[in-house]
Each structure stands twice: as C-alpha cells, then as structure tokens.
Amino acid sequence: MIRVAVVEDDPVMSDILCNAIDACEDMSLTARRDNMHDGSRMIETGGYDVLLCDLGLPDGSGIDLIRQEAATGRDTDILVVTMFANQKNILDAVRAGARGYLLKDERIEDCIEAIRNIRRGGSPISPIIARQLLKQITPEQANDGVPLATPLTEREYEVLNLLARGLSNSDCAEVLSISSNTVGTHIKNIYRKLEVNSRAEALFEASSKGLLS
C-alpha cells in the first residue's frame, strides 16, 4: 500500500487528487494540507511514502517543504504537481530533493500512475519540463555529434537522450528494440555514473556536462 500525503492549496485540484488516490486499491491518503505552515507540521510527523507538493502556496514556497522533507532522510519520494514550468522553479525543486515534476494539466490518470512510478524508483517528468531542463546549457560537442569525454556507453547515451525527449522506459525499449528490463539496467548505470538518483537530476547533470544532443 502506497501512503500518500498531499499539499495543495487549490481546493478543486486537491479534491481531484485526493479522490483519485482514495479510489485506488493500492494507495491510501494519509494527510491533506493546503498551506506551508500545516504542511511543515505534517512533515514533522511523517507517516507517508510519497509527498505530492504544489510550489505556489499562500504562505510560502513548496520548495521549502521539499527541502524540509529531504532533510529528514526518510525514504520518501517527492513529486511536484504544479502550474509553474519556468526553469528556476524546476531546478530549485530538483535541487531541493524532488524526484518527479508534473504540471497540473496532466491527466489525473497520469498523475496517479506517476505516484506508482516514482515509488518503483522512476522519475516521472512532464515532457515540457524535460525540454526546460535541456535549455539550461548548450552542449559543446565533437564534430561527429558525440559529446566530448562522455562517461557513458553508446547505448546509455542513446537511452539518456530518449529520456530527455520525455519517453517512458517502454517507449525507449520500443525505439531501441530492446526489453524494458534492459532499459532499466541502462538507466541504473546512467544514474550511477552521473551520481544522481532521479531522471530530473540525470537530465540536469547531463545537460551541465554537455552529454545531450
């Protein structure tokens, strides 16, 4: 059973998320808060596996809550669900400890699946967010189009660039004609070599190192 806590100040969006979570047999809603103050007290108590957090709260920034949760050292997965798609908010959230970043215009079914995905070790990111991460740095590449001094194998490099386009593991497998399990192995190797723990961190780090085409 995946225990989920939600911090969302928009009552309509909060109702949609919470009702969808309650309707899932493999999830339970353990807490629901609508501001930073109450969210902070909730984090002090804990008792959940996944934290869904908005960024624009009436009394502060959800990024501070993300940072607070990450500092506890618990095995909590933090998923941002927000309307903010600008680069600063994305990077601040990732650096604070978010492992996934979705926009509120995603289908509720996709949000629910993202909760399962992030708990399995994935890093769900809206495609537009992936594109924002790619805009951070223009890679310096060799004449043949392959980044200089890449620590990745050719296949890992291919998988990384497919992830940067917003493709899922199964989509990557189909494009490369390999199994989803093999894609998962490549992603684990990418995370290890880049010293990161999520897709968002991997894209940011790869962009910083000039590893994306």
Image (cartoon, rainbow, N blue to C red):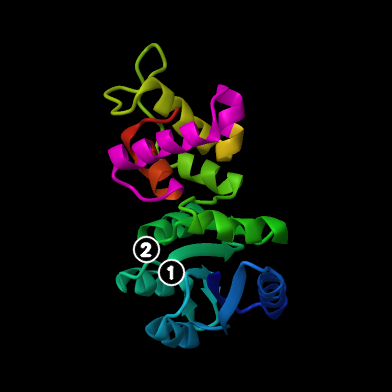
Mark 1: few/some/many CA within 10 Å (<14, 14-19, 20+): many
- Which of the 4 quarters of the picture holds residue 191? top left
Q: Is residue 185 part of the magenta span, yes or no?
A: yes
Q: CA distance from mark 2 to mark 1?
A: 7 Å
Q: Please state if 138 lies on the left or on the right of 131 as rendered.
A: left
The answer to whether residue 81 is seen in the rendering is yes
Q: Quadrant of the C terminus?
A: top left
Question: Residue shown at 54%/35% (left/top)?
Answer: 180
Residue placed under numbered mark 1 in the picture: 63
Mark 2: few/some/many CA within 10 Å (<14, 14-19, 20+): some
Kindly identify the amino acid type of the residue bearing the numbered disc 2: Ala
Q: Are marks 2 and 1 in contact (CB under 8 Å)?
A: yes
Question: Residue shown at 28%/45% (left/top)?
Answer: 195
Q: Nearer the viewer, residue 66 or 18?
A: 18
Question: Residue shown at 49%/51% (left/top)?
Answer: 123
Q: Nearer the viewer, residue 126 or 185?
A: 185
Residue 122 location, x and y as percent? 49, 50
Point out the stretch of residues depicted in magenta. Answer: 172-199
Kindly identify the amino acid type of the residue bearing the numbered disc 1: Ile
Residue 45 location, x and y as percent? 40, 86
- Disc number placed over residue 96 in the picture, else none: 2
Compared with 50, 36 (above or below) is below
Compared with 173, 41 (above or below) is below
